[in-house]
Image (spheres, rainbow, N blue to C red):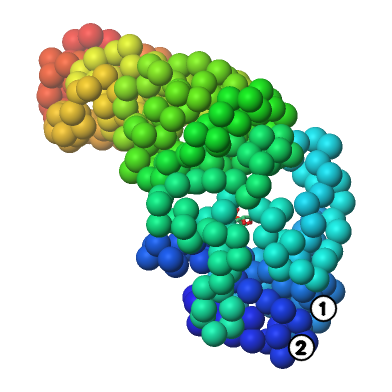
Amino acid sequence: MLESALKILEKIEENGFQAYIVGGFVRDYVLGIESNDVDICTSARPKDIRSIFKDACLPTDEYGSVTVILKNIRFEITTFRKEQAYSNYRHPDDVEFIDDLEEDLKRRDFLMNTLCMNRDGKVIDLLGGKEDIEKKQIRTVGDSSQKFSEDALRILRAVRFATVLGFTLTDEVKESIFKTKSLLKEISYQRKREELDRIFTSVNVKMGVSLLLELGLDHELEIFNLDKVSNFDDLIGVWTQLQVSDLYPFTNNEKDLMENIQKALSLNNLNHRVLYTYGLYVNSIAANIKGISKKDVTYQYNNLPIHSRADIVLNGDEISSILKKNPGAYLKEIFSDLEDKILSLELENEKEVLTSYIQNTYS
Ligand code: ATP
Ligand code: MG
């Protein structure tokens, strides 16, 4: 990844422009962690980048970054720009390109995210980002309250970086978050969810949640149940406990899952009928939230005599021929009865047993 990124820098510079790797990749490089994307900043304009990397560019985004795909890696190439006016607390109104790297770095969010790397692989630290990485601390570039007021998403990014990297927020940053946190209302639920997902799936999730609570962000984010969430093993389980499915965006699949987990929460997750109806995944999550071990649930689930209607040894045609009737709606009731009796171990899932039960009960 680094090698390909340096090649890109070289290519841009051969065309007479400056280019550096910037931000997360360099921060992670200094920390010795792997990054999954590379951001590059350059004095070249988007049209220059598109002509340098003709075949490899994705359609341009509305803010003038060009995405280049090389060897399956995404490189986000962004022209040096000035801090812009933010009228909606999120997206700059328009972009002003500049030729100066340092000026570009000043518009960024945190000092640790201003580190650059040049084409020789040398780390360049114009604003003091290395110091923050060494001290494991997060400071904004310039005045914190101003940074957070310009773009309130930075508040959540601060908490997310603190969580994922195990860093601390300086007192100044915390105080500014207190002052500006009401602006989080202006941020889309989609963006908020993306940051929260990264906090909830971090190994340091407990620390992240404490930080959210300490800063009172649970209220600003309308996740009022955050202090009651008892288990963070499963992301969708966390969202179920937060009960915000009508507020935050979820796929229909996620919504169904949360609804089922919610129902399964009030049931006995070791009960055969419950395991059969809601399945292993939903019951495991529900059990986990209640402090019942996943292992017990899995053991009980694997021991179910049947896992679906298809496991019953008689099919609809066989049942109707036992009763000498045409197949019809009545079969549904019989199947449901058979499921109950088999799951409660009153009947063995055995052809002869079921045949004589059906003859005795339904003919
Ligand atoms: P990660 O990719 O792990 O989320 P990152 O630091 O690379 O971390 P990106 O969202 O990829 O974050 O952004 C790349 C760089 O762009 C950041 O390092 C930072 O310098 C700058 N940046 C991103 N979002 C903002 C923002 N909201 N305000 C100011 N600068 C930002
Ligand atoms: Mg990045």
Residue 84 image position (x, y, % from top left)? 82, 49
Nearer to us in this view, 287 or 321: 287
C-alpha gap between disc 2 and disc 1:
9 Å
- The answer to whether mark 2 and mark 1 are in CB contact below 8 A is yes
Q: Residue at x 23, y 9 (%)?
A: 361
Q: Residue at x 32, y 22 (%)?
A: 230
Q: Residue at x 66, y 66 (%)?
A: 76
Q: Quadrant of residue 362?
A: top left
Residue tagged 2: 15
Q: Nearer the viewer, mark 2 or mark 1?
A: 2
Helix, strand, or loop for circle 1?
helix
Q: Amino acid at mark 2?
A: Asn
Horizontal side, residue 171 vs residue 288: left or right:
right
Residue tagged 1: 48
**Residue 2 in sight from this viewpoint:** yes
Residue 317 image position (x, y, % from top left)? 35, 31
Q: Quadrant of residue 152?
A: top right
Residue 168 image position (x, y, % from top left)? 42, 41
Helix, strand, or loop for circle 2?
loop
Nearer to us in this view, 95 or 142: 142
Horizontal side, residue 59 vs residue 244: left or right:
right
140 to 106, vertically: above or below: above
Q: Amino acid at mark 1?
A: Asp
Q: Residues within 10 Å of mark 2 (few under 14, many from 20)?
A: few
